[in-house]
Structures are given as C-alpha cells and as structure tokens.
Amino acid sequence: MRIGIDCVPLLLRSAGVKSYTYYWLDSLRREAGERDAILTFPVPGPFSAIDHEHSMAGLVRTVAGIALLHGLNASRLPWTYPGLDVFHASTHWRNPPRLAKLTTTIHDMTCWIMPELHSKANVAATRYVGEHIAKRADGILAVSENTRRDAIEILDLDPKRIKVVYPGVPEPFFDVTAEDVHAVRAKYGLDRPYILSVGTVEPRKNISGLLAACAALSPTTREQYELVVAGPIGWADPATVAKVRSVRYLGYVGEAALPAITAGATVLAYPSLYEGFGLPVAQAMAAGTAVLTSNVASLPEIAGNAALLVDPHSTTEIRDGLERLLTSPSLCERLGGAGRVRARQFHWHTSARASLDWFRQLV
C-alpha cells in the first residue's frame, strides 16, 4: 500500500497540528516497515528535528513546496499520483489527488462551536476543509470520541466513515529523570515550586482565567508557588499578553526541554474552554505531574480519573482546585501516579498501527 501524507504543517509555524504530523508521520514509517510506502506531499522527506517556530524542510524545499501547493489549489485541475492508494490531507489542501482514497484528521471543532475565539481567516479556512475535504473523504480520523461526536453532529458525517485514533505522547515524557529536571530548572532559573501552563497564548486556552485564579490564591500559596507560562504568543488580547509577561513567561520552549519542565512542575494547570484532545494534559500525565483541567469537551475523556476537573468558566473553581492540589502533596502524588497509568494508552506506535489498519480497511 502506498500512502501519501500531506506534510504542509511541517513547513509552517504551528504547534499542536505540527506536533501531531511530525510524530505521527515518523511512527507511520516505523510501523509500516517494508510492507507499506509512506510518501509526503508537497515535498519529500527527510525533515529536521521538530521546531514549532520554523520549517523543517529547509528554505528551498519549503518555498518550492508551498508554491506547488498554492498552484494546485488555485488551478483546480484534476491530478493523480501513480500507484497512490491513500492521500491524507491537512487543513491546507484544497485540491487533493484523484483516484486515491481521501482521508483527513479532525483535531477539534472549535471553529464551529466557538468561532469567536479564532481569527476570521482561521475560521474560514478550517470550515472550508470541513465542508470540502471532510465531507467528501472516504475515511476520517478523529483524535477523541468527543471530537468524533461533535464532527458527526455539526458536519452531518456518516459515523461509519470516522474512526477515533488517539494521538500519542513523545517517549521522552515517559522517561524524565531527576537530573533532567534539575538541569532544565537551572537553565530557566526556576528556583521556586511552580504551576505550569503550556500552550499558545490565545483565548481558547483560557490563560486569563488561570491568571485571575492564581492571583486569588491565598497569600501563603502565592508566596510559595509561582505561575510559569510556556508557549508562543498567539492572538490573545493585549491586556492578557501584558499579564502573561508579568509572571514567569518562558516563551516558546523547544521539544527537548518541555518534558523536564513538565515533570518539574507541581501542577499542570490547563483550564481550556475546548479541546479536541488536549496534548499537554496527556504529556503531564506521562511525566507523572498532577493535572488540573477542564470538565468540558474531550478533557474528561483524556484525563479519566487522573486529573482534578473544574469548570473553566469559574475563576473560583479554578482557584479552589489549585489551592486543593498545592496544599495536598498526597493528592498530587496520587494523581501523578494515576496519570502515568492513564498515559500508557497514548503511545505513537499504537496510534500509527491503528491508522494503518484503518487505511488498509478503506483500500
């Protein structure tokens, strides 16, 4: 079987979808072995180590690939790739090759459910793919059961065409050592115990709610713990950005340091308003870090019994949840241990194997 993977996210500045594409593609190739050929479009591999801020294909291949993508999208002329059995499209492809089975991954439905939290351009592009790629796809992967249900209801999809395949957690999160944590804390000057927030600073992540909750913690707790925010600035309002920069803001943290920063936290706080999966939650569980997250969308499904769930719209609930965790080492230890067990189902080789089985079934 010959499978074409749209690798455009690897050429752009991105976060969650880029991580998914990179680790999923690498795992597909490992699992496929010699049985199946994994090809990438619009540029062939190899790719450099993952970097969310830059293209992983070099300047020349990136420019050529983006030009080819735009040319095919603009032309609308039918095209084929000899012998290709499956083509898996991302949100950037408008004119996929003919004859091959068309598939895609639905990461979340927030552009339909909460469009006010996104830019108009992002909403328009994502909805276009939903209408013109997902609706005509032969098979669809959903990153959670919650995302699957939302996609079926909103896009009126045939349930038989959409399969839940959880993403994985990069292996370093499962194997962080005390030495790793000590080194990364020294590198970033993290001398005090800390609450960690990971993700792009944008409205859906509810950073403003977390900041308000942390400011409302008891004086003793605020003196003992600091809030550390790791992630690039997205499209948050200027007031939120200013508040983020007033705490320990690390900016974009590369993949090499993120596992140790996560493992070194007392609590990962992730009160997102909506998630299709919630990768930072799964990563923190793999690292054995206690998690506070939202009781909405996919987050209860992913966290299971390994997190403290709160209403993300309630600053009081977020504050009380944090206070409870930060004053109870035994609770943090219990949730951290439960998280390690829960995270065992989120391995990339499992995700790749299930994806390949789905492709074979479609073909």
Image: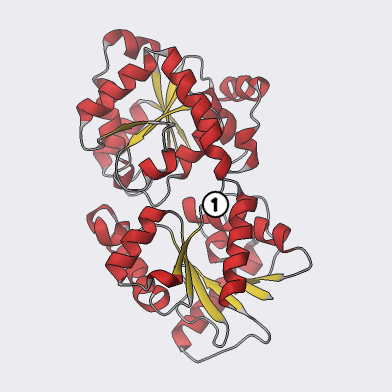
Which quadrant holds the N terminus? bottom right
Tell me if 74 is positioned left or right of 214 in this view: right
Tell me if residue 88 can be seen.
Answer: yes
| Vertical position of residue 188 compared to residue 37: above or below | above
Disc 1 packing (10 Å; few <14; some 14–19; many ≥20):
many
Report the residue at 62% width, 58% height from top.
352
Report the residue at 35% width, 72% height from top.
157
Q: How many marks?
A: 1
Report the residue at 50% width, 31% height from top.
339
Tell me if 247 is positioned left or right of 280 in this view: left
Which quadrant holds the C terminus? bottom right
Which residue is disc 1 drawn over?
A: 19
Look at label 1 and name its amino acid.
Ser
Label 1 element class: helix
Q: Residue furthest top?
A: 220
Q: Position of residue 129 (x, y in %)?
A: 39, 72
Pick the residue in front: 191 or 158: 158
Q: Position of residue 314 (x, y in %)?
A: 20, 33
Report the residue at 33% width, 49% height from top.
235
Tell me if 353 is positioned left or right of 346 in this view: right
How was this image coloured? secondary structure
